[in-house]
Image (cartoon, rainbow, N blue to C red):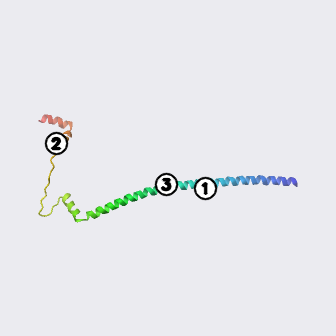
Amino acid sequence: MISKFKKNKKDKSFKSKIFSAFLVVLILFIIIFIVFTDWRINKRRDELLERASILKQEVQILEEKNRELKEKKSESESEDFLEKVAREQLELKKPGEEVVVIQKEPSSAEALEDKEKKTWWENFKSIFQK
């Protein structure tokens, strides 16, 4: 009977050691899983915060553009702007008005630039044309 008790005690001891080892491995696996998941969540959170920051900057830029466009729209609806466009781009005039165009004379520097812009062939032909 004593031998059975010792054998039974050894079996329980062996089973309890295996069960304990299994529990330790399981707990370690759970801890590693939790740490890894937490790391991935933090990484994703950082990416989303960075993206949110970029999107906030884009929103500010777009709001500024929107404000400028609203200003231009309100300006373009004014009578003065319409008259300016009609005069400058459509070359219209009011009845009884005369349009005077003042042309600027080319300076000597501009004339020199025009001469330099000629190709070598044009320069060569101009020698024989004189």
Vertical placement of 10 versus 130: above or below?
below
**Is 25 on the left or on the right of 76, as rendered?**
right
Q: Residue 100 falls in which quadrant of the image? A: bottom left
Counting residues from the N terminus, which is met first, the one under dot 2 or under dot 3?
3
Query: Is 71 displayed left or right of 120 in the figure?
Result: right
The residue to which callout 2 is attached is 108
Name the amino acid, label 2. Ser
Tell me residue 29's x, y (percent).
64, 53
Image position, residue 56 (x, y; %): 42, 58
- Label 3: how many Cα within 10 Å (few below 14, some 14–19, many 20+): few
Q: Residue at position x 54%, y 55% from top?
A: 42
Q: Work out whether residue 78 or residue 23 is closer to the camera in this orientation and state it.
A: 78
Location of the N terminus by quadrant is bottom right
Alpha carbon distance from label 1 to label 3: 20 Å
Tell me the residue that label 1 is attached to: 34
Q: Residue at x 40, y 57 (%)?
A: 58
Q: Amino acid at mark 1?
A: Ile
Query: Disc 1 on helix, strand or loop?
Result: helix
Q: How far apart, in angstroms, are the residues tagged by discs 2 and 3?
A: 61 Å
Query: Which numbered mark, 1 or 2, is in the foreground of this view?
Result: 2
